[in-house]
Amino acid sequence: MFDPAGDQVGKIRDFVVTTRGAARAPSVFGLVVEVAPRRRIFVPMTRVTAIDPGSVVTSGVVNLRRFERRPGERLVIAELLDLRVTVQQSGEKVSIQDIAMTQDRSREWLISRVFIRKGGAGFARRGPTLTVDWNEVSGLFEESGEQGVDSLLASIETMRPADLANLIQELPNKRQLELVSGLDVEKLADVFEELPEDLRVDIMSGLGLERATNVLEEMDPDDAADLLSELPPEQAEEYLDAMEPDEADDLRRLLAYDDFSAGGMMTTEPIVLSPDATVAEALARVRMPELSPALASQVYVARPPLETPTGRYIGVAHVQRLLREPPSQLVSAVLDTSLEPIGPAASLGQVARYFATYNLVALPVVDENDHLIGAVTIDDVIDHMLPEDWRENELDEEG
């Protein structure tokens, strides 16, 4: 979306439509536009002055208040595509693949035609397709209608987890569950880490035991422990009993700490190497794509065992230092022994001051016997310093 001067306003993520009665074509009321930083706003169609391939031009001032779907409104991509509707003349069930809109004489945008695919249950991508007038199908605005997720999943394939979490918050409960059921476990775990507490608890409860435990095992341990602490104790214990024993043991250790302590914020899966490991081995470990940038900034050295809780903690090697050393150099020769680890009982305030004083992005956590038990990263510190509902409530702005 561009303004009249040609400057980009944002990216169009969906269209908002509303019914006007059985005999009148549904109205395309406006656009959902994503503007920086990850805010979805509403832009009325009355502001649209041109629609060209790959771009839409708007006029006037854009209201940056966060978009909220109102009763009676539907989102085209999120809620109508793949919807199962009925062809009125034959009674045949079909799925919606696309929707066309037309501007009438009064310059109002209306849904005019729908592109449908015939086929049986399962919404398979087979069967003939055709285009019909909007009023030749029924069930377009039924909240309880059957609906697949193929088109929706295709539209969100490149979305970051935080953006996908924002989208999920805008959907009705039924569509939320349909979407998360279609996500692979890895992506769903990333999305769960970005959702507000109450919403992820509701969704987790609807996943079923096997899928829920798979998601918990895929999440970062600290985030998984936070989620378990939000569930009823008997439900949390049921999930823990169904998990792999090693994974469950890590989470039980984290659940023993206060949420706002170093132990409650840490992950139990930092990079840990033995003293005889080389710089080349350390750099190979930090290249692992699943590591967050903060967690990949440091390599911890400890005596065996190397799984937390480890043997005696020796020190930390910073990635910037590792990059300046020969690959054959022992990592134990380039340790920063001046960085004192912190204990699991340290408060959020103590941890935050430690990070600020020494300009850190990660910090090792050891127990009373100098065994490395985890690491706190800066993203978790910031997360705990913000209000609990920071993911839900953004400052309203107008511009």
Image (cartoon, rainbow, N blue to C red):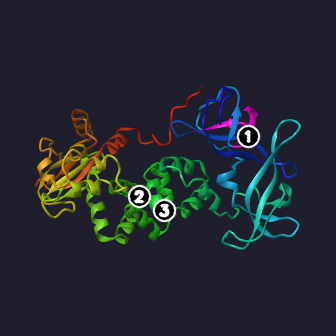
| Residue 159 placement (x, y as % from top left) | 53, 50
Distance between mark 2 and mark 1 Cα atoms:
49 Å
Q: What residue type is disc 1 on?
A: Asp
Figure label count: 3
Identify the residue under disc 2. Answer: 231
Q: Do the residues labelled 2 and 3 touch (CB within 8 Å)?
A: yes
User: Alpha-carbon neighbours of circle 3 within 10 Å: few (<14), some, or many (≥20)?
Assistant: few
Q: Is mark 3 on a helix, strand or loop?
A: helix
Could you tell me which quadrant the C terminus lies in? Answer: top right
Residue at the far bottom in the pictured view: 120
| Residue 377 placement (x, y as % from top left) | 30, 46
Left or right of 309, for residue 290:
right
Distance between mark 1 and mark 3 Cα atoms:
44 Å
Left or right of 213, for residue 399:
right
Q: Is mark 1 on a helix, strand or loop?
A: strand
Could you tell me which quadrant the N terminus lies in? Answer: top right
Q: Are marks 2 and 1 in contact (CB under 8 Å)?
A: no
Identify the residue under disc 3. Answer: 205
